[in-house]
Image (spheres, rainbow, N blue to C red):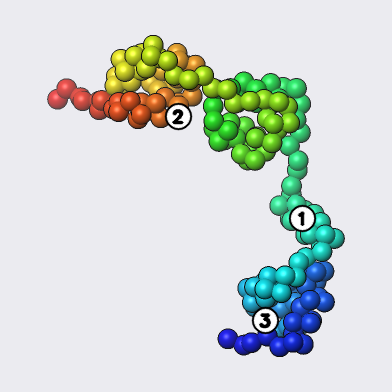
Amino acid sequence: MKHWTETEDAQLRELYPDASMEELVEKLNRSKDAITSRAYCLKVKRSEKYMQESRTNARKKINFKPYKWNDEKVALLCELYNKMSPQAVAKEMGLSIHCVTKQASRFGISNSVPKWDSDQDDFLKQVYPNTKISLERIASQLDRSVPAIVSRAHKLSLKRRKNLKNG
């Protein structure tokens, strides 16, 4: 491992805030990891201008298009967020969890999934083992998501019976 000289440290302090990693690698003749690690040790940071440009370029590269929220999408978020976990809502809407939770907070939507009561537990105990009744149907009858049904069944130590064919 090659040690950093005072001259290299001075160059890094001068160049790191605004130079691209490719430029730094070329000028310092060091790996990206070595440069990043040394900058961290020296407490040298990227400039705000560099970070802004980097984010803009990254968005262009991935063809980033911000999600447009309208009344219909907010209504869907409200409906789903009260029935499902933020992860399930994100998957359903094709968004990141961060986007879902940020917008829910922005619109004042709270995840207030009601607690399970004994009647729902009793119903689940009766129907969950029966594989003839789909999980989607059970979820619909209890006004819950399928993952919520599976999770609750697991907590109650319920198992689905295997379909046995008459042979």
Q: CA distance from mark 2 to mark 1?
A: 35 Å
Q: CA distance from mark 2 to mark 3?
A: 49 Å
Residue 147, disc: 2
Q: Is residue 114 left or right of residue 129?
A: right
Give the position of the N terminus as an image quadrant. bottom right
Q: Write down the residue under mark 1.
A: 55
The type of residue carrying mark 3 is Arg
Q: Write down the residue under mark 3.
A: 30
- Answer with the quarter of the image where residue 7 lies: bottom right
Indicate the secondary structure of the residue bearing disc 3. loop
Residue at the image position 69 percent from the left and 21 percent from the top: 75
Indicate the secondary structure of the residue bearing disc 1. helix
Residue at the image position 21 percent from the left and 25 percent from the top: 164
State the image coordinates of residue 8 (x, y, percent, origin top left).
74, 85
Q: Say if residue 146 shows up in the picture.
A: yes
State the image coordinates of residue 66 (x, y, percent, origin top left).
76, 40
